[in-house]
Amino acid sequence: MTGRILVFGWGNPSRGDDALGPLFVERIEALQLPGVDCLTDFQLQVEHALDLYGRDRILFVDASLEAAPPFAVERIAAAKDASFTTHAMTPQAVLQVYVELEDGDPPPTWLLAISGERYELGEGLGAAAQRNLEAALAWAADWLVAGQPD
Amino acid sequence: MSLELETAVHPENLRRVAIEPVSRVEGHGKVTLLLDENNKVHQVRLHIVEFRGFERFIQGRPYWEVPVMVQRLCGICPVSHHLAASKALDMILGAKLTPTAEKLRRLMHYGQILQSHALHFFHLASPDLLFGFGADVATRNVVGVIAAAPEVAKKGVLLRKYGQEVIRLTAGKRVHGTGTVPGGVNKSLSVAERDLLLKDIYQMVTWSREAVQIIKGLFAQNLAAYNAFGRFRSHSMSLIRADGAMDLYHGGLRARDMDGKTLFDHFDYARYWDVITEGVKSWSYMKFPFFKSLGEEAGWYRVGPLARVANCDFIPTPLADKERVEFLAYDGGSVAGATLGYHWARMIEMLHAAESIKDLLHDDDILGSDLMAKGERQERGVGVIEAPRGTLIHHYRVNEDDQVIRANLIVSTTHNNQPMNEAIRQVARQYLDGNEVTEGLLNHIEVAIRCFDPCLSCATHALGQMPLEVELVAADGTVASRLAKGSDGTFCR
């Protein structure tokens, strides 16, 4: 049974604050919320468009160098870009793949960008990132239960 | 085997062009070119920051953690590191795998080959091949492929998804799987899991055959251009089965020179350092492997699909072998030496992977319960597999307290360091000499690099990363022109 809400975080758990996405998903998954599916991966790729099928809402979660602490949330839309040149696609490009494959709009999607600073191999999560993670989780508790923010 | 264009005689009088994808970690796949006042190319170098810190990341850890830990070295091919590490640690344990364990590992590996090759061909390379190397960047991307050829693109997505499902079911999870452990595997497939994969495998074989026809058709339409693009002569190396068959999971090392003459064959990879060593150059963080017997300047070689398909005596699945024979004979054998021939060879391997998955799914050993083996404990272990991008070497020493005290990894992209440099030098000669740098010309360089499917950036990223920047710097240091690609793929001057 596919959950109506998908929480999808990405990043490398062994690269410092890049673990924010997977850790966020791990914590949400532990709550065992009904109707909420949780997925993680190292990075986004084309096949992840197939994970979006049949969802009411989607929350993408990633670490971000650019987001002001503790986190930033925005509604995102499908967009064509050239992220094919790497092995990691942008979330907007994944939504666009969905549009092209389905010939229809993807589910409403938000991007939660949690502020991170350090990304070296072998590092753990930094103290600031840990605080940002907790703040993001607090926000998500409302979002997942209450409905859609503007 | 010349190193022409590696180092300019008088670099001080030349303009410098840098193509620099700035990424936060492995990042820095950077191309630099030195041009004179007439835009004639005098020097071309590809610099790639290696996976620095890999060995340090592993040292001191208990050996049984390593197959899981190493998956975090690379987000592109975690399964390759998982399997190569497990093979090395099998040797530490002195374990000879049970049939169930070996077949499940092979299944996982072929799943990875399938998904990796599908992604590369349908979504990373096909935009260049379908729309042209210098086509409008707005269409030269995966979305453009889907719009122009939706059925082809969708098959690529579903092939990739199927390979990921094979990995999920054999590794236990979509990512960070724990399926293989030193001495064996920790789970077999259930009948239900086997049947789930069986349901779609024939479709995957069919689509893989179609993919071979697509690249074959593209070669037929563009034979002269494809054959000439970034072409260079090279030695090659790959694993080979005892009977000469292609074997991507296990075998001995076979090396051939650029004329096809065998340099060494069925060499025990547990002593790879007897035949391979690595050189260093001051301008690159990444090492330059070469065959010891030929020396650093003449001994570099290529690995990966093109080397593997050309090196083996046969492919042990019928459809792929038929394609191998045609590939090697095509246009008098010219394609097997073409840099773009990597794409064709890659699709032959994808077909081989699909056929191999089919065969394994019909083998009841994958449902078995004899998962682990033990033997006489050793201090040193070497594991080698043919990863999607080429030969991957993991080498560990473990002390009496079961801690890893030394680790050495030679990844596929490192083997291909010099070949990638050769390819872009050829492209620079062919396309850049005398021309102003444009996005389309820049992409020609990337097309050449992309043939090798290198691991330039992978395991980590964050929003806003992966720009690409090119600067033309005059001899006096001033920036003559600049071209930048943003994280959303847009270009600006």
Image (cartoon, coloured by chain):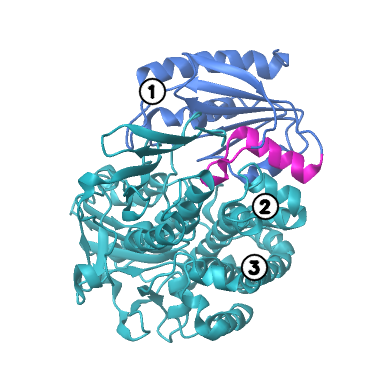
Q: Amino acid at mark 2?
A: Val
Vertical placement of residue B455 versus B330, above or below: above
Depth check, mark 2 against mark 3: the one in front is: 3
Secondary structure character of the magenta stretch overall: helix
Vertical placement of residue B140 versus B261, above or below: above
- Residue A66 in the image, given as x and y percentages of width and height: 47, 21
- Residue at position x 65%, y 13% in the image: A142
- In reply to whether residue B465 is colored magenta, the answer given is no
Residue bounds of the magenta highlight: A81-103
Vertical placement of residue B106 versus B32, above or below: below
Colour given to chain B in the rendered image:
cyan
For the residues marked 2 and 1, what is the alpha-carbon distance in whole angstroms?
Answer: 33 Å
Q: Amino acid at mark 3?
A: Leu
Identify the chain drawn in blue: A
Residue B157's label in the rendered image is 2
Q: Which is nearer the N-term, disc 2 or disc 3?
A: 2
- Residue at position x 65%, y 38% in the image: A94
- Residue B489 in the image, given as x and y percentages of width and height: 56, 37
Q: Could you classify mark 1 by the number of other residues whose Cα lies within 10 Å: few (under 14), some (14-19), or many (20 or more)?
A: some
